[in-house]
């Protein structure tokens, strides 16, 4: 494994250009996304608290994380990670670890009790990554299709 990206290369997407620059990597995790709708959808989610952090290496976006802060009676305040993906050609270089550690640090500073996420049953490689970073599987997620 090569050295992870150095600190300071993680940014929050705020301008339209930055959000759109995250699309090629985000689409690798969410292949159903349509580029022409991406900005509108992200902006709508941002109005409800969604944020995208992106990691830069070699002058381009190599990993992205979508997250938000939530509060429930079960957990109190916590961070929910919607999306975490590294460019397929850039994996196993520590980018995912860097971004994950940044998310954990932010969640701690924001007084969160937990960092939570859902990961598809088929994503066994990603599960290895999460288990290695201290996460534990502690519930089943149920989903009822409505359309
Ligand atoms: C999971 C993921 C974000 C990790 O990012 P990364 O930049 O490769 O992370 P790191 O380099 O810090 O750690 C690599 C480890 O992640 C795991 N991993 C998971 N999927 C992997 C993949 N497709 N290729 C390489 N490593 C993967 C491995 O355990 C790997 O360890 P190894 O290099 O010793 O084999 C990235 O592999 C990815 O984008 N996967 C596809 C999208 C996905 O499933 N995201 C999670 C959605 S819930």
Image: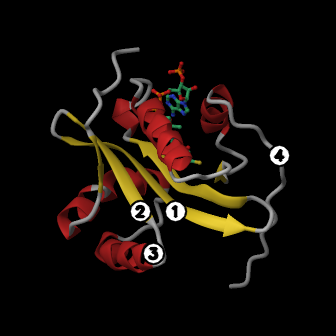
* Left or right: 11, with 77 as reference point: left
- Which is closer to the viewer, label 3 or label 1? 1
- Specify whether 142 is left or right of 132: right
* Residue that carries the numbered disc 2 in the rendered image: 51
Check the image and name the residue furthest to the bottom: 147
Looking at the rendered image, the disc whose residue lies closer to the viewer, 4 or 1, is 1
Q: Quadrant of residue 133?
A: top right
Image mark count: 4
| Residue placed under numbered mark 4 in the picture | 138
| Quadrant in which the N terminus appears | top left
**Cα distance in 3D space between marks 2 and 1:** 6 Å
Residue under label 3, please give it. 45
Circle 1 residue: 68
Circles 3, 1 touching at the beta carbon (< 8 Å): yes
Give the residue drawn at x 67%, y 30%.
Answer: 134
Residue plotted at (83% across, 46% down): 138
Q: CA distance from mark 4 to mark 2?
A: 25 Å
User: Front-most of 65 and 146?
Assistant: 65
Which is more N-terminal, label 3 or label 4? Answer: 3
């Amino acid at each position: 494994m090569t050295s992870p990206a150095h600190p300071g290369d993680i940014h929050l997407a705020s301008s339209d250009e930055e959000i759109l620059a995250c699309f090629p990597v985000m689409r690798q995790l969410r292949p159903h996304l349509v580029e022409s709708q991406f900005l509108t959808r992200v902006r709508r989610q941002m109005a409800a608290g969604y944020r995208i952090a992106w990691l830069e290496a070699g002058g381009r976006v190599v990993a992205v994380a979508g997250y938000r802060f939530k509060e429930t009676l079960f957990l109190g305040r916590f961070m929910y990670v919607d999306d975490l993906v590294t460019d397929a050609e850039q994996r196993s270089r520590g980018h995912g670890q860097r971004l994950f550690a940044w998310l954990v640090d932010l969640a701690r500073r924001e007084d969160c009790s937990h960092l939570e996420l859902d990961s598809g049953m088929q994503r066994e490689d990603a599960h290895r990554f999460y288990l290695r970073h201290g996460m534990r599987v502690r519930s089943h997620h149920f989903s009822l299709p409505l359309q």
